[in-house]
C-alpha cells in the first residue's frame, strides 16, 4: 500500500474507531449481541490502525525521548493495555459470538472488562487530543472564515468542553473507573442519541485536556532547546 493511500485511510479508520468506541459505551441501549459485534469490528479497526502506523511503532524507542514523546508513548501503552484487557475479558464474558469456545465467564473477568472499557475510553479520548492540532490548523487555514465565525467556533468549543465535564459527573463515570459501581445504570426512558452525545462530550473534554498538556510540553521543549 502506497503512502498516499495510507494517508487517506488513516482519518477514516480513526473516525470509525471513535464512533465504534461511543457505541461500545452504550452497552445497555444496544444490547449484548450488538455490543459484541461492534467489539469485533473495533478489534479489526484497531489492527488496521496499527498496521497503517507500523512505521511509527518501529521508531518508537529511537531518537531523543523528549517530554512530548514520553507523553505520547505512555498514552499509546495505556491504550494498548486497556484494549487488550477489553478484548480478552470480552471473549471470556461473551454470551453470543464466542460461546463456541466454551470458556466459563467469571466475576473477575466482568470486573476486568468494565475497568478496561472505562479506562480505555478515557485513555483513547486523551490519545485523540494529540490530533487536535491538525483539526485546529485546518480551521485556521480557512481564510474565508470571518472573525464572527471564528468567535462562534470558540464559544461552541468552550460550551462543548464545559458540558463534557458536566456529563462526566452526570454519568458518574468515576464510579465505574474505580469499580464503586459494577453495574450499568440508566435512567428511565434513556435515549440513545442523548447518551451518545454525553459520552462524545466527555471524550471531547478529555481530548481537550490532552491537547492542552501536549501544547504546554511542546512550548516548554521549544523554550528549553
Image (tube, grey):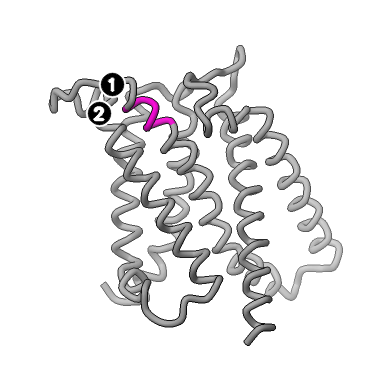
Q: Which residue is mark 2?
A: 92
Q: Residues within 10 Å of mark 2 (few under 14, many from 20)?
A: many
Decide which of 201, 6 is in the foreground and name it: 201
- The residue at 27%/25% (across/down) is 94
- The residue at 54%/24% (across/down) is 180
Contact, CB < 8 Å: mark 1 with mark 2?
yes
Among the two numbered marks 1 and 2 on one chain, the one whose residue lies closer to the N terminus? 2
Quarter assignment of residue 196: top right
Magenta highlight: main SS: helix
Q: Is residue 48 left or right of residue 199?
A: left
Between marks 1 and 2 in the image, the one whose residue lies nearer the viewer: 1
Q: Which residue is mark 1?
A: 106
Residue 194 in the image: above or below residue 123: above
Decide which of 107, 120 is in the foreground and name it: 107
Decide which of 74, 132 is in the foreground and name it: 74
Q: Which residues are magenta?
A: 109-114
Amino acid at each position: 500500500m502506497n503512502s498516499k493511500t495510507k494517508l487517506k485511510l488513516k482519518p477514516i479508520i480513526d473516525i470509525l474507531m471513535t464512533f465504534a468506541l461511543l457505541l461500545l459505551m452504550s452497552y445497555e441501549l444496544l444490547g449484548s449481541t450488538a455490543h459484541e459485534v461492534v467489539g469485533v469490528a473495533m478489534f479489526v479497526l484497531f489492527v488496521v490502525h496499527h498496521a497503517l502506523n507500523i512505521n511509527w511503532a518501529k521508531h518508537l524507542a529511537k531518537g531523543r525521548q523528549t517530554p512530548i514523546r514520553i507523553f505520547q508513548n505512555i498514552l499509546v501503552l495505556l491504550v494498548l493495555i486497556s484494549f487488550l484487557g477489553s478484548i480478552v475479558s470480552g471473549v471470556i464474558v461473551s454470551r453470543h459470538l464466542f460461546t463456541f469456545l466454551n470458556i466459563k465467564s467469571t466475576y473477575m473477568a466482568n470486573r476486568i472488562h468494565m475497568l478496561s472499557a472505562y479506562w480505555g475510553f478515557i485513555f483513547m479520548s486523551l490519545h485523540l487530543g494529540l490530533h487536535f492540532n491538525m483539526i485546529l490548523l485546518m480551521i485556521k487555514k480557512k481564510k474565508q472564515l470571518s472573525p464572527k465565525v471564528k468567535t462562534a467556533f470558540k464559544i461552541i468549543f468552550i460550551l462543548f468542553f464545559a458540558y463534557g465535564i458536566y456529563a462526566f459527573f452526570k454519568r458518574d463515570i468515576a464510579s465505574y473507573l474505580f469499580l464503586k459501581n459494577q453495574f450499568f445504570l440508566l435512567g428511565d426512558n434513556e435515549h440513545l442519541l442523548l447518551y451518545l452525545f454525553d459520552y462524545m462530550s466527555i471524550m471531547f473534554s478529555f481530548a481537550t485536556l490532552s491537547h492542552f498538556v501536549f501544547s504546554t510540553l511542546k512550548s516548554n521543549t521549544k523554550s528549553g532547546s
